[in-house]
Every structure is written in C-alpha cells, then in structure tokens.
Amino acid sequence: MPADRTPERASDQAASSPEQAPDRVPLATERAPEQVPPTPGRAPERPAPAEEQGPEQLALMAEPVRSARAGGRGASGGRGARHRSGQLEPAYLAETDPVARVRLESHLPHLDRLFDYGVPQDLSEGAQAGTRIRVRFGGQQMRGWIIERTASSEVAFDRLQPILSLQSALPVLVPQVLAVAELTAQRCAGTVADVLRCAVPPRVASVEKAALAARDSAEASAAVAAVNPGAAQRAGHSGAEEAAEALPDAQAETDPETAAHRARPLIAAEPAAPSAWSEYVGGREAIEALRGGQRVRAVVQALPSHPEHDLYDLIAQAVAAALESGRGSVVVVPDHKTLERAQRAVEAVVEPQLVARLHSEDKPTPRYRAFVQALEGHARVVIGTRPAVWAPVEDLGLIVVVDDGDHSLVEPRAPYHHARDVALLRAQHDDLGLLVMGQAVTPEAERLVETGWASSIAAQRPVLRANMPRIESTSDSWHEAHDPLAGRARLPETAFRVARRALADGPVLVQVARTGYAPSLTCQRCRNAARCTVCDGPLSVPSRGRLPQCGWCARQAANWSCGHCGATQWRFSSVGSERTAEELGRAFPQVPVIWSSGDQVRREIPAAPALVVATPGAEPQAEGGYAAALLLDGDRMLSRPGLRVEEEVLRKWVHAASLVRRGSAGGTVVVTSEHERVVASLVRWDVRGHAARELAERRTLQLPPAVRCAALTGPLPALEAFLELVDLPDDVRTVGPAPVHQRWDEEAEDPQSEAASADVLGGLSDDDEAHRLLLFFTYSQAAEVTRRLRAARAEASAQRKHAPVNVRCDVADLL
C-alpha cells in the first residue's frame, strides 16, 4: 500500500485476519515508518504479564471489566463499563503517554506499518517499548510489539482500541535490534514482522520469571548493602536460590563481585601474547586495537593445518581482547559442529558464565534463556548459529562471522536475509567492529576489502606454505604421463598410493560429493536418467540391498521400466558415501571405515588409522590432524550449473584440506578433478586471488556481488501486474520471466520446492506455472528499488487482485 495513503482508506483495506480484509477497521490508526521518532531505551521493572491464551488474560484487567464480561454487558470485546463499543474511554487511559504505537505480528505486507492503540491505566507500567502485547485488530486478537509510547494520536482517544494484555514481562525488543530489523526489511524488500520473527525467539514464561526474580534479588541486596553492608551477601544468597535454579547459567546479581563483572568482564586466564594473530600481516595491530576499545573491521583468512593456533583460537583471542576493553561480542557460525569448537575455544579464555550459546536447533527454554542472559547483561559473549547475529548483547563492540560462504547462514524464510548482511547493517548502524573469518574468502568479503570498508588480514606466503599440506593433482602433466587413465578413474592409483602410505601414520579423509548409496540411476541400455513411473521423479538406491526409490514420492520402483526404451535394467550413475565406504572397505580389508554424512555426522575421531568417508561439511575433526585427504568427485561437483559453483567447490576443498597436517609433518591432499582454474587455486592455496578474479569477472558481467539482484517468482499474470505496480527505473536490467517448473501455491507466499520437473506440471495451465524474473541493479540504486518493491508488495497484498509474488534479494541459490 502506498505510504501516503490516509488512515481512513488504509483501514478500509486492512486485514481482519492474517488472510482476510475487513470492510472497515476504525479502531486503530496507521503510522508511516518514517514518522516514528527514536525508540526509547530499556524499560524499568514491570509486573508479570498475562498468559498467552484463555481466561488468565483477564488478570491484568480491573474487576469491573471482568464483571462486565461475565455478565455479557460489554460490546464486541466485552469491555463493559470501561469501554464503549470495544473502545477505551479517555478516563481509563494511562495518565502519561496514553497512546502506544504498535507493530503487528503479521506477514501481510500491507500491515507492515504502525498502528495506534490506547494504553489502559492498569497496564501502563508494563506497556513499555519493546514489550510483546496482544491487541484486537479487525475482530481478531493478534500479537504485536509496542514500538513507542506517545502522548498524541491522529485519532480521538475515545476511538482508540485498547491493548488487551501484555505478553512478556521484559522489553525483549531493544531499540538497536529494532533499528537493524527495519534496515534488514528495507534491504530485503520484506516486512519488519518477518525479520522480528527471526530476531526474537518465542517467549518462555518461566525464564522471564527467573530473570525478574534475579533482578528483584539484586535490587534488594543493593538496598540492604546501603544500610548494612555485612548483611548484603546473606540476603543476596537467600533471595536468589530459586532464580539460580531456573536460570542456572546467569551469574547471581547478589554476588558482591557481580558489579565488577559487569563493569569489566572476567577473563578466565590471562591470554597469552597474541602469537596466533602475530603470524598475520596486520593481526597484532588488530588485537591491540580491540584491546584499546577501537573499532576493527577486517576479512581474516585463517591459516590451514596450524598445529597450535587454529581459526577458533583466533576467534577466542579477538573476543577476549574486546572484553578487556569492556565490550561484548557476538560470534556467528554456520553449524552445530563449528559452534561447539568455537564455544570451547572462547570458554578457554573467557569465564564460561559470561558466554551464552544461541542455537537455532536448541529447545525453546535454553534458547530463550540464552537470549535473556544477553538481554539482562549476564552474558557478554553470545556464540551461535544464524539467529545469534540478533543477540541483544549489552555494550556490543564486535561481531564475528565465520565461514560466510556457507548456505546455512541464509535465512530459509522470508525475507531470506544472510547473517553476514545483517552483521554489516548492525556494524554500520551501531558503529561496531566486524571480523569475517574463515579459511576461504568469498567474493562478497573480497568486495568489502576492495571498497575499503574492511581491511585484509592474512599470512605472508612463506608462513602459508609452511602451514599448508602438500597438494597433488591427478590431472597435472606428471601424473598423466605416469598414469594415462588417472583422469577417468574415480579413485586413481595415485590416491591409492597416498592412502596406503598415510594409513601407517593416522586417519585418511575421503571427501565424496553425495550421501547415500547410489544417489542417481540411469537406464542400462539407453543411459537416460531412471525416472519414477508415477511422478517422474529421480530414482536412487538409499542403501545396499534396497530397491530403487523415488526421491519425490518415495515409492519403490519394484517393476521399473525405462520410459524411453522400455528396458528393465538400470545402472549406478553416481556413487554416494555409503557405497564408497563399502568399496574402500574391500580395498583396505584391515582398516576400519567410518562414514560421516547425512544424519550420521561424526564430530571427532581418534588419531588411530582409519578411512573416514564424508560429504562436504560433515568431515569430523581428527586428533592431531589427518595424515592425508582424498578429494573425489570434483568434476561432478563442478559440472553443476550455477554462478557460484567454483567458489563453493573451492571452499569445500579448502575446508577439507585444512583438516590435514602440514606438509612438513607428512600431510598430503590428492584432488582428482581436471578443472584447471579451481585446482590451481587449491594447489597454490590462492583462495583470496580466486575470489578477486571471480569478483572482477562479475563486475564485467554486472553480476552479484558486483551488483545487487532480486528475484520475483509467481504466476505469469501476477508477475506482469506486479511489475506495473513496481514501476522500475529504466536502467534496472531485467532477465526473464522464465518458467521455473514449480506449482505456485496461492495459499502461501513462499513457493514450493523447485525439485519438480516440467513433466509433472505438464497438465497445468500457463496461469498455474510459476515464472521468475531477475532484476539487477547497482548498489546506488538499491534503496530506491527495494523501496518500490516493498510498496508494490503492500499494494498488491491489500488489493488481492492476483496471486502473490515472492520477492527474494541477493539469494545465492537462485543464480
């Protein structure tokens, strides 16, 4: 909906529920986002809220209101004597700032704005900025956030709809996070409500009660200490026992040392001299700057195979340096395995009670507990996966993003933001330091260096060569001369020779492209892909001795016949990790074979000789490092279509090779691909040079990340109507629309999986088939283009004249 729409017209088209628009909603007025003044700071202590649902919500209402509801005298909301037709009478409004500007928890784009609600006097103390609330909107109860309290509204007070209840006892949405959420929604052409769903975890009442109990106990101890210092410690310990049980990881505020902890966080042990960082050009200066409270922004390329200081030691020393200056840190990692290693490294140099873990896969209670610990200032360091980038750490000074090329850092739900981009926005908005760290360097990170936004921290070539393993390519001229068939063999003789020699000294890593037994099959006669006879999905063999199974409908192909030639015999066209482990077990009968892939991911293995078969990202850590690594299926991985295939394959190879011992200790890596450019970058360990060349090529071709992009997906008529609403600038380059071979679900905004083939959709009309249009625009145009996309989404959502159009910005998997 356009930003200049009047409140009356906007109310006419606002939704009465998350799916329907009412005829008229006169009880709330809208505010354009640009009219919102700065959000006030953290609210003081407030009473506990009502429960989420049920009659307990009436606990925060005055007795006359409950009596009126019981007698059925109230209108539309049952508000009885205090309310007139569901509205709040001015006499019962809060005396100070009686109007709350509220953002609803709705994914509908045309509700992505502020609405005015009346604040009842009995809820005034707790109804502070950042508090979750429940309100009535268009005849339904909805959740929302108080963005600010104000003394005026464009709507008469007696026509304001009241806040029904408080849904949180703490103001969990802090101003800094809200500001970055709004910037993220603008950048991604999404809604603020969708961003806040990712930024603030679901509420757990018991955790909030424990936090309030700890706060009350601290205040009581402070009051006792002011009168009788000797009794402070006794009162504190007795008052905080219950809170300590419910919030075990939070340090008791009653401890006399707590104030010192908050003023200057404890370091578990005096950090050693920054020997890890001193091996990098600019590393020592960066650590000293962090200790001095300065802002450091850099792209750090970590050394491989370092026997003393790995990537996680660098992270720990950077976090400790920031804490020494009194500032908190956030460390964002891609997966659980990396999270555990980073947490161990940080807790080795920082007091564990100052560290909170925020993992998207944790259960609600520990996840919310970690969030509240950061909110209350108990946790000064938050380490976690994608959601950790939003952690409300007090006095935040440093954000660390690890392995920013991993797709796990991309939010799979709208608005599909990347944790690195959120960290950039947060660093820019709050003037924070930012370290993008990893063994590999992405073109996005290289662009930050080339534009001068960040510096580059890397080791010099002699130091790099001393720490990297020996890398052999079976496609070079020497190996081809000695083994002409090496390029055709999946596991050439060179790889067997290296593995035999290395197994005498430790484990050997074998990286394969895909999990399972036989991920794909072809017809034995015509070599066409074997497809399901019911849904035309791809067939695979999940494990040894099993019948082929469809990857889409999961039906077993017991009586399969080829749809092209009629043959009934099939063959393996690719080999997965399970089949590879089986073949290696026959080749090395006396050696244990371990596989790590899919749902069976091993985190660590001992130093004993073993063959470890793993898919990319599932490689376990070996004690003392692997003696060798065999990188198989490189050509198969590089043959996939996509703009980022080369950089992704190089990143996977670099990560696997970094687990191998340095060359001086006998560590060897064998890569079997024939792709010269990527293999050459691996052999020279020139990952930043590869990223720079990729960026230069994309700058010439005007492709991301040299420019920004947006993908619009939906039925063709809907795309055409949506483009008319957007009214793109003339110099925005468009590609498409083109079919994406997926059925568009009009019930939801997000498209279904794109795995379906065109044959499945052959019976659908053109109106049902999804199409995609790509937009390419410069960074200077980005703010205007995303603003128009957001406005078009809001107007299309309000009018509901065509099917929804999905908008995704800067998503790597679409190119």
Image (cartoon, rainbow, N blue to C red):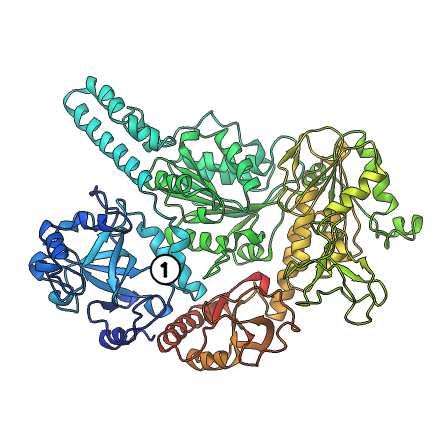
Q: Dot 1 surroundings within 10 Å: few (below 14), some, or many (20 or more)?
A: many
Residue 411 appears left or right of 106: right
Residue pictured at 50% horizontal, 82% vertical:
717
Q: Amino acid at mark 1?
A: Ala
Q: Which quarter shows the N terminus?
A: bottom left
Residue 480 appears left or right of 159: right
Residue 629 in which image quadrant: top right
696 lies above or below 165: below
Comparing 657 with 193, the one in front is 193
334 lies above or below 692: above
Q: Give the SS element for disc 1.
A: helix
Label 1 belongs to which residue? 193
Q: Position of residue 166 (x, y in %)?
A: 24, 50
Residue pictured at 25% horizontal, 77% vertical:
9
Comparing 93 with 802, the one in front is 802
Q: Position of residue 341 (x, y in %)?
A: 56, 36
Residue pictured at 63% horizontal, 70% vertical:
701
Comparing 359 with 82, the one in front is 82
Residue 552 in which image quadrant: bottom right
Q: Is residue 179 visible?
A: yes
